[in-house]
Image (cartoon, rainbow, N blue to C red):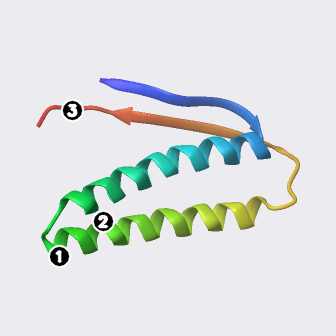
Amino acid sequence: MKIQLVDGQFDVADGLTLISRLLEVKIRFHEDKINSLSAEEDIKMRENKIQKLQKQLEELRSKLDGKTSQLQLKAEINVELI
């Protein structure tokens, strides 16, 4: 099953807002898991994922800083039972 989250053109500010909010949800998910975990290995793995997401968002913000063009955004989730 595929779930289409985003598919369209956005100005830079709206695109960054949308991406930021999506990443914030993912970061919050990992933070909530960290708060309920006790295994140090799992905590470190989730902290690394959070840092990676934050770094990617910062890189995107830097790349788009001052740009006024449109962004084409597409995001899809593929769901499979395994």
For disc 2, the marked residue is 46
For disc 3, the marked residue is 80
Q: Residue at x 48, y 62 (%)?
A: 53
| Circle nearer the viewer, 3 or 1 | 1
Which numbered tag is attached to residue 25? Answer: none
Q: Secondary structure at mark 3?
A: loop
Q: Is residue 39 above or below residue 31?
A: below
Q: Secondary structure at mark 2?
A: helix
For disc 1, the marked residue is 40
How much space separates mark 1 and mark 2, taking CA atoms? 10 Å
How many C-alpha atoms fall within 10 Å of the one at disc 1: few (<14), some, or many (≥20)?
Answer: few
Q: Position of residue 63 (x, y in %)?
A: 73, 64
Marks 2 and 3: in contact by CB < 8 Å?
A: no
| Circle nearer the viewer, 1 or 2 | 1
Q: Quadrant of residue 69?
A: top right
Of label 3 and label 1, which has the lower sequence position?
A: 1
Q: Position of residue 19 (x, y in %)?
A: 60, 46
Q: Is residue 47 above or below residue 73?
A: below
Q: Amino acid at mark 1?
A: Glu
Marks 1 and 3: in contact by CB < 8 Å?
A: no
Q: Position of residue 66 (x, y in %)?
A: 87, 59
